[in-house]
Amino acid sequence: MADLAAPAQLSPDDPRSAYMALVRRRRMYSGLTLLIFAVLFVGGFMVADARNAGGFWDGWHNMLDFPADVAEEAWAQRAEMPSLLWRYLPALIETLNIAALATLIGFFGGMALSLVSTRGLAPWPRLIPVFRRIMDILRAFPEIVVALVLIFMLGSGPVPAMIAIALHTAGALGKLYSEVNENADLKPVEGLHSVGARWGQRMAFGVIPQVAPNYLSYGLLRFEINIRASAILGFVGAGGIGYELRNSMTFGQGKFDEAAAIFLLLFLTIVAVDQLSSVWRNRLTYGTGVAG
Amino acid sequence: MTDATADAPIDRRRAEAVARIGARRRFALAIPAAILAYLVYVFFAFDIPGLAERVRLDNAATLVADSYSHKVHVTRDNRSGEVTVAKEGERRATYPQELEPDWVARGDTVRVELEDGHAVILGAENTATYLHPEFGPIEAQASRAGGVQIDIAEADLPDWISYSSSRLDIRTDAGRLTMTRSRTEVHRYFFGWELFWFTLDSPYYNRSLTEIAFGEQLDPARPNLVGAWQDFWNNGIWRHGDVAWAMAETILMAFLGTFGAAMVALPLAFIAAKNFTPLRLVRGVARRVFDFLRGVDALIWTIVLSRAFGPGPLTGALAILFTDTGSFGKIFSEALENVDGKQIEGVASTGARPVQRYRFGVLPQVMPVLLSQVLYFFESNTRSATVIGAITGGGIGLLITQAIITQKDWEEVTYYIILIVVTVMLMDWLSGVLRRRLIKGDGG
C-alpha cells in the first residue's frame, strides 16, 4: 500500500516501477468501482425478484403464453382484422393528435424558455436561474401524475393528457434548445442590436435562423417520444388508443383479437414515425439546402 | 450556375430573385397558416367548447385546499348522540377524550369554536345551532320522521347554505356544518398536513424535536430517539416506511432496467456495427432486432411482461430493459461505427487477440460516450419507472395512482409528487455530475 500511496517520489532512476504502480492503482480503482456496481446490481436484482409477484426464473416460460394467446385468437379471427384496424383508427388518430399538439405547444414553450435562460441572449440575465429551475421542475414531473390530477379537474378526455405531455415537452426541449443556443453565433444578434432591433426581433432574425434545423430535429425526436407517452397515458384513462387497449385487455380472453389489432396499429405507427423522423432528422442535420 | 446567371441580362436576374423571395415568403406564410388550420381542427376534435361544461372547479378547489391544509371533523351520530373528534374524520385519527383540542367544549351541549368568532352548538334532541356573527344564529334539527329542518324560510337562504329535507350544508370561510338524518358534522380547517410525524396514539405526538431529543424519556420501554424513529417510520396514516420502499423500488426498476439493457446491448451493438461485422445479413438481423424492441412500445412490453411475471419491480425493470436494449443498441452501434481504426491497429500490432483488441482498442474510445448516454437514460427512466409502476402495480407509481383514484387523500398525493420530483431532480443532478466527469476524462 505504501508504494501505491506515494508515486510522487518517482525515482528518476526507476520510472518503470513508478508507472506500473500508477497503472496498478488505477486498475484497483476501476476494479473496485466495477465490484461495487456488480454487488449493487446483483443485490438489486435479488431484492426486485423477491418483491415481485412472480419470480424471474419461473416467469420465462410464461413469457410467450400471452403473445401466443393473442396471436392465436387474432389468427382465428383474421377475417375480422381489417375491420378492427379500421375501427381503431379514430382512436389512433386521437393519440397522434394528443402527441402532435403537445409537441407543438411544447416546441414553442421550450423555445421561449430556452431563449430567456441562455446566457448572452436572455433579456433579463438575473432571472436565468429562475427559468432554469422552472424547466427542471417541468421535466421532473412525471406526465402521468399531471394527467391524473388534471383528469380529476377537467374530466377524462384528450385535453389533460395533452397538457401533461406539453408541459413536460416544454421543459425537456427547453433544456436541449438552450444547449443549442449556447453554440449560436452572437454576431448577427449584435448587428441587429446596433440597428436598434428589439429583443424579439433580435431573436427572430438573429438566433432562430441559425438554430432552426437543430430545433426541428429535436422537436421531431420529441414527437416520437410523445406518441409513446400519449399511448401510455391513454392506458391510465386519458382517451386514445391506450384506452381502447385497456378496455380490450380487461375483457381478457375473447377480446384478444382487438388487442392484437391495437398492438399492430401501435407498432406500425411507432415504426413508421421512427423511420420518417430519422430520415428528416438526417436531412436537417446534414442539410440539403433548406437551411435559412 | 453562377456563370449562367451572371451572363443573363440584369432584368431577368432581378425577376428571378424577386420570384425566389416571393416563393420563400409564401412558404414562410404557409407554415403559420398550416399550424393555425391544425389548431382549429384540434379545437373541434378535442371538443374544447364542451370542456368548459366538464370542468369541475370545485374539485380543483378541494384539491388545492387539501394539498396544504387539513380539517378536523366533530361528528355526532344522530342515533346514539355520541360525539367524536377526528382528523379528516378517519377512525384511526380519532382523538382520545383527554387529548381533545380546546376548541371543542363538552358539557350538556357540545360547543365547537370555529374561526372568526363563528361557532356551532350541538344541542339536545339532535339540534345544531350555527352562530354566525353577521348573519345571526341558524338553527337546525334532524329527526327520523321529518328529516332535516331549518328555521329559515327557503326563500331567505343565502347562497352559502344549501338545504333540502334530507341534507343541510352550511359552508363559510370559518368552517362547515353538514347535517343529515343520521349524522351532524362540523369541519374546522387547519394549515399543514395532519399527523405527518406521529399519529395520535404515539407518545411523541405533539412534542417538539428538542423535547424528544433532550427531554425525559416519554416511553418507558424505548429510548426517545429509537421510539420516535419507530413511530415515525411505522406511522399508520402516512406509512413512511412503505413509501420509502416504494420509492426505492422505483429507483431500482430504473437502475436494473437501464444498466441491464446496456449490458445486453453492448455485445449486440458490435454485431450491428458496419466496421465490426462485415456480413450484411447478420448486421441486418441485429438492427431489425433493435427496431423491433423499440417499436414494441414500453406500454406493450409492460403488459406482456406483467402477464408473465405478475406485478412488482422486476416486471418494471424488465420492461425498461427490453425497450432500452433497442435504443442502446442503435446508439451504441452508431458510436462504434465512428471509432478510430488506428488505435485498434496499434493494439493489434502488439499481437493482441480479438477480445484484447476490443478491450484496449475500442472500449476506451467509446466508453465515455456510451456511459454518458446510459446515465442520461437512467435519469429519464426514473421518471418512466413511475409510469410503468402505475401500469404493472409497483413502486411509487402504484401508490400515487391509488391515492389519486380514491380522490380524497390529496395531501398524500402532494407528498408523493414532492418525493418523486425531488428524486428525479436528484437523479438529474447526479447523472449530470457523473457525465461531466466522464466527458472531461477523469482517468478513464
Image: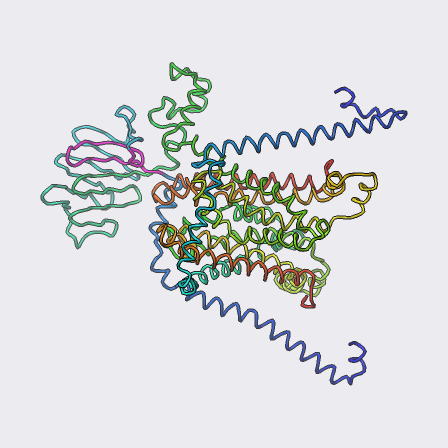
Q: Quadrant of residue B76?
A: top left
- Foreground residue, A143 or B256? B256
Residue at left 43%, top 21%?
B212
* Residue B233 placement, left or right of A111: left
Residue at left 83%, top 24%?
A9
Q: Position of residue B362 (x, y in %)?
A: 74, 43
* Residue A81 placement, left or right of B298: left
Above-or-below relation of B47 to A36: below
Q: Position of residue A117 (x, y in %)?
A: 61, 51
Q: Quadrant of the N terminus of chain B?
A: bottom right
Residue reaching furthest right?
A13
Q: Position of residue B343 (x, y in %)?
A: 79, 44
Span shown in magenta: B70-90
- Foreground residue, A103 or B109? A103
- Main secondary-structure element of the magenta-colored stretch: strand
Residue B46 showing in the rendered view? no
Residue at left 48%, top 57%?
A266
Residue A244 showing in the rendered view? yes
- Foreground residue, B2 or B128? B2
Above-or-below relation of A18 to B263: above
* Residue B52 placement, left or right of B129: right
